[in-house]
Structure formats: C-alpha cells, structure tokens
Image (cartoon, rainbow, N blue to C red):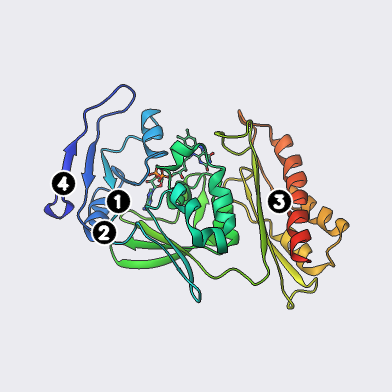
C-alpha cells in the first residue's frame, strides 16, 4: 500500500461477497494515484449499490475497493443563478430529490431519481454512480443528458471535463481511464420556458429497471424552423443511452402537430436497437419507444406551447 493512500482495512468475507481490501484514501490525488497504479484490480465506489451487487454476483473481482465518497467537496449541492447547478458525486439520490434548487429549476432530475428503486436504496445510490455505471437502463442518465450535464473528472493529470454526449462507449463502458474519479456533475441554466418529462416503463411500479425509458425536454427556440426544440434520450433500447437525433430534427424542422409528433416517435423507434431479455422482448421495446416518445413529447409540447 502506498503511504498516500490513507487507511486500509481487510474486509472479512461474508457469504456471497469475495474477499477484497477496502481502501479509504485521504485525498483525491492519493485516490487517483492508487487507482491508476492498480489498474484492473482496483475500483472506486460511492453508494456501492452496483459495485457490491456485481461483486456478490461474481461479475467483478477487484482486489481493492476504493471509497471515494466525501473527498474534496464531493458532498455539496450548489446553485448559481448564472452558471447553474453542481451536484457533488457523493450526493445521494434522496438528497438530490429533497434539494429546493433541484425542485425549482431542475425538477426533471428529481422526477427521474424518484423512479430509481426504493427510498432505502436511494439513501445510498448516487446520480454520478448511476452515470458512471453506464447501464443503458440507468434511469437518471437521460435527464442528465437532456439537461446538458458535464462530468468533472479528477485523474492522474489533474481535472478535466467530460460532456455526457460523448461519455458512454458501450454497456458498462465509458471514456473513464484508470485513476479517473468523477467529482461532480454540473448543469447549465435550463433553456427559458422549458418543460420536461421522464416516462419509465417497468415490470412493476417501483424497484425494477426500465424496460424502456423516455426523457423529453422541450423549449421555444426562434432559431428552429418549428419554433421549438425537443431534446430526447432513450433508456434500455440500445447499448448506450440513446439520443434519437432524427426524431429531434423532425421536431425542430416541421410545425409541431400530432402528425409531426407521430413521425418523430416513429423515428425514435427506428433508431432504437434493443435486445430481448428477462424484462421484455426487443419487439415490445421498440413499440414502447414509439408509444412513450409520443406520450412524453405530447405532454412536453402541451406545456411549452402555453
Ligand atoms: C435493488 C436495486 C435496485 C435498483 N434499481 C435501479 C433502478 O430502478 N434504476 C436505476 O437506474 N438503477 C437501479 N439500480 C442500480 C443502482 O442503484 C444505480 O446505478 C446507482 O445510482 C449507482 O450509484 P452508486 O453510488 O451506488 O454507485 P456505485 O455502486 O458506488 O458505483 C457504480 C459504478 O460507478 C463507478 N463509480 C462510482 N463512483 C465513481 C466516481 N466518483 N468516479 C468514477 N467512477 C465511479 C463504480 O466503479 C461502478 O463502476 C438498482 C440497484 C439495486 C441493488
């Protein structure tokens, strides 16, 4: 163990969990250094709601589990009326949902977070963990994408920013490199007059991953031929969280009518490439993309045209 890495505890295995060393670094620099030096055998965690489940189920076998919670301001939620919202990486979803600034300016984030599992789980699970886990089914990722979120990353070479638009490269895979630690996500002030909606289809009302999730955010835009723009993000229907750009273009270019919304919903369905799994068939998912996109865009449109 390098001296810079702070405390080390040997975890005693319990049924289901493999043996691992628990590392609690004293600083971000020490954490990045340790993770980079142990590439392939060390993993950062925050809420651990994905990490420990994946380890218990034998998918992940890291030797070192590195607690990066609460390092250097990672536990703050701050709002600035000119620059926007910052959510520290260790802020759990219940804190996010309870934040007055989130409720007032970014209610979509709270709406999406509220669909994640149960209250109990949300006291551990974080927004940034949901993003870094990079599941195509991650419920909060679409909201973060349409709100134009940017991750702040601490790596061995210092700080950098990663926009979510280029962050995901495959199921469970991101552009993060060994040593990288997300410290926060920031959101600009949302467009004036916007409205947004997240619709999640699960097998039951709570506690299940999405079969399909559709996020829509619309706002008036004089630069668009239709006078409006609608940003869309789809969950659980492609290897990565999917932006159906053709559907967005249709809504920006043609006067928004029921027919235009149907056409955009069809384009979203055509863009999706879901798989069959225990939660639903690919065919069902595709049809649901069309139905839920139509529903989400219609709801958003009814609010923004007022
Ligand atoms: C019972 C149950 C139900 C669930 N239901 C849902 C659901 O309905 N919807 C949904 O979207 N998800 C669901 N999940 C998944 C999970 O709760 C979320 O993905 C959660 O948001 C992950 O956050 P976390 O803080 O627990 O991440 P962790 O488990 O700590 O980490 C997740 C991943 O991100 C990486 N990581 C964590 N922190 C950082 C960091 N700061 N920098 C870089 N990488 C980092 C980890 O190495 C790991 O790969 C469920 C999980 C369980 C166990």
Q: CA distance from mark 2 to mark 4?
A: 14 Å
Give the residue displayed 22% in from the left and 58% down from the top: 27
In terms of depth relative to the viewer, which is nearer, 296 or 288? 296
Circle 2 sits in a helix, a strand or a loop, which is it?
A: helix
Which is more foreground, mark 2 or mark 3? 2
Q: Residue at x 22, y 47 (%)?
A: 24
- Give the labeled residue for mark 2: 28
Asked if the residue at tag 3 contacts the one at tag 1, i.e. Cβ–Cβ closer than 8 Å, the answer is no
User: Quick check: can you spot residue 138?
Assistant: no
Q: Is residue 248 above or below residue 97?
A: below
User: Under tag 1, what secondary structure?
Assistant: loop
Q: Where is mark 1, residue-wise?
A: 68
Answer whether residue 81 is visible to the viewer in this image. Answer: yes
User: Decide: marks 2, 3 in contact (CB < 8 A)?
Assistant: no
Q: Is tag 2's residue or tag 3's residue first in the polypeptide sequence?
A: 2
Residue labelled 2 has its Cβ within 8 Å of some atom of ligand 1: no
Q: Which mark is first along the chain, 3 or 4?
A: 4
| First in residue order: circle 1 vs circle 3 | 1
Label 2 vs label 3: CA separation?
40 Å
- Quadrant containing the C terminus is bottom right
Disc 1 or 2, which lies upstream in sequence?
2
Of tags 4 and 3, the one toward the viewer is: 4
* Coordinates of residue 167 in the picture (x, y in percent): 49, 58
**Rounded to the nearest whole Å, what is the CA distance between mark 1 and mark 2?**
8 Å
User: How far, Cα to Cα, is label 4 from label 3?
Assistant: 48 Å
Q: Secondary structure at mark 4?
A: strand
Residue under the point 25% across and 34% down: 20
Please tell me how crowded label 3 is: few (under 14), some (14-19), or many (20+) other residues with Cα within 10 Å: many
Q: Quadrant of residue 218?
A: bottom right
């Amino acid at each position: 163990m390098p001296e810079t890495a702070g405390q080390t505890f040997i975890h005693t295995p319990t049924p289901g969990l493999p043996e691992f060393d628990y590392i609690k670094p004293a600083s971000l620099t020490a954490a990045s250094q340790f993770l980079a030096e142990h590439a392939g055998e060390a993993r950062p965690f925050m809420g651990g709601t994905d990490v420990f489940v994946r380890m218990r189920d034998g998918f992940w076998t890291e030797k070192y589990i590195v607690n990066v919670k609460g390092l250097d301001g990672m536990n703050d939620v701050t709002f600035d009326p000119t620059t926007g919202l910052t959510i520290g990486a260790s802020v759990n979803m219940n804190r996010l949902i309870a934040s007055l600034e989130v409720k007032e300016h970014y209610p979509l984030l709270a709406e999406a977070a509220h669909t994640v599992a149960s209250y109990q789980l949300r006291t551990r699970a974080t927004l940034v963990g949901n993003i870094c886990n990079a599941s195509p089914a991650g419920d909060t990722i679409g909201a973060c994408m349409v709100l134009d979120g940017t991750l702040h990353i601490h790596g061995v070479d210092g700080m950098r920013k990663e926009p979510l638009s280029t962050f995901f490269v495959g199921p469970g895979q991101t552009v993060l490199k060994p040593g990288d630690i997300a410290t926060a996500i920031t959101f600009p002030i949302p467009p004036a007059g916007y409205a947004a909606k997240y619709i999640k289809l699960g097998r039951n009302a709570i506690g299940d991953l999405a079969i399909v999730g559709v996020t829509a955010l619309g706002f008036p835009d004089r630069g668009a031929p239709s006078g409006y723009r609608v940003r869309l993000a789809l969950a659980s229907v492609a290897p990565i969280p999917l932006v159906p750009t053709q559907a967005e273009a249709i809504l920006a270019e043609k006067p928004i009518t029921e027919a235009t919304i149907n056409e955009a919903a069809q384009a979203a369905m055509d863009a999706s490439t879901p798989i069959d799994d225990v939660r639903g068939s690919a065919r069902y998912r595709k049809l649901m993309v069309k139905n839920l996109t139509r529903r989400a865009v219609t709801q958003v449109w009814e609010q923004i045209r007022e």
